[in-house]
């Protein structure tokens, strides 16, 4: 049976605590992971996505939790977590955001998955992710359609400062 349990919510809380770069990396990784690895998560998402829109509204999530007889305290926590997971701020959690937030570490810390995600970040293939590549990938003010999450140049600089250990 498909259900929302404490481990799912714990994993979502952990995702919320990650820095912005790791959240974006997990979204990219979520696109690289094999379907077999995320079968249960996909089934859970499809169960929750009542209108089959490919995204979960807060209302859909709450309705599903009521149907699954989840305690009210957990439902309230889930609303807060869902709001924090909504990376692009559109009021919904899309499939990729959901998978990124709920996938377990042992499922995404596999060399082939991480390598595939790194190659997406490393646009010019030189083995290094530059500030420019990150800005292109994350999106910027001039052309938000080219990036993944519409991060502006100032935030890209903050992300790089936080993540770049060797300058």
Image: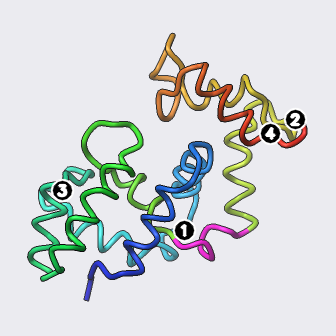
Q: Place residue 61 in its image quadrant.
A: bottom left
* Residue shown at the point (15%, 74%) measured from the top left: 72
Figure check: 87 above or below 109 = above
Label 1 – label 4 distance at C-alpha? 29 Å
For this view, does 133 lie left or right of residue 151? right
For this view, does 111 lie left or right of residue 2? right
Q: Which mark is residue 126?
A: 2
Q: Place residue 59 in its image quadrant.
A: bottom left
- x, y percentage for residue 53? 20, 50
Asked if the stretch drawn in magenta spans residue 108, the answer is yes
Q: Place residue 107 in its image quadrant.
A: bottom right
Q: Which mark is residue 47?
A: none
Q: Residues within 10 Å of mark 4 (few under 14, many from 20)?
A: few
Q: Which residue is mark 4?
A: 164
Q: Secondary structure at mark 2?
A: loop
Task: First in sequence, mark 1 or 2: give its number.
Answer: 1
Task: First in sequence, mark 3 or 2: give its number.
Answer: 3
Q: Which residue is mark 1?
A: 34
For this view, does 9 lie left or right of residue 141? left
Q: Residues within 10 Å of mark 3 (few under 14, many from 20)?
A: few
Asked if the stretch drawn in magenta spans residue 157, the answer is no
Depth check, front residue: 136 or 58? 58
Q: Secondary structure at mark 1?
A: loop
- In the picture, the quarter occupied by the C terminus is top right
* Residue shown at the point (62%, 67%) measured from the top left: 108
Task: First in sequence, mark 1 or 4: give its number.
Answer: 1
Label 3 – label 2 distance at C-alpha? 40 Å
Q: What segment carries the magenta color?
A: 104-110
The residue furthest bottom is 1
Figure check: 63 above or below 138 = below
Task: First in sequence, mark 2 or 4: give its number.
Answer: 2
């Amino acid at each position: 049976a498909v259900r929302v349990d404490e481990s799912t919510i714990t994993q979502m809380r952990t995702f919320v605590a990650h820095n912005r770069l790791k959240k974006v990396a997990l979204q990219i990784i979520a696109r690289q992971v094999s379907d077999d690895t995320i079968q249960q998560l996909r089934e859970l998402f499809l169960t929750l996505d009542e209108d089959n829109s490919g995204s979960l509204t807060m209302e859909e999530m709450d309705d599903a939790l009521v149907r699954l007889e989840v305690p009210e305290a957990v439902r309230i926590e889930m609303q807060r977590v869902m709001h924090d997971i909504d990376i692009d701020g559109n009021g919904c959690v899309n499939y990729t955001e959901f998978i990124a937030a709920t996938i377990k570490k042992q499922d995404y810390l596999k060399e082939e998955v991480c390598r595939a995600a790194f190659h997406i970040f490393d646009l010019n293939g030189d083995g290094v992710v530059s500030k420019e590549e990150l800005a292109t990938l994350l999106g910027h003010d001039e052309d938000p359609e080219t990036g993944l999450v519409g991060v502006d140049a100032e935030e890209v600089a903050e992300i790089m400062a936080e993540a770049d250990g060797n300058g």
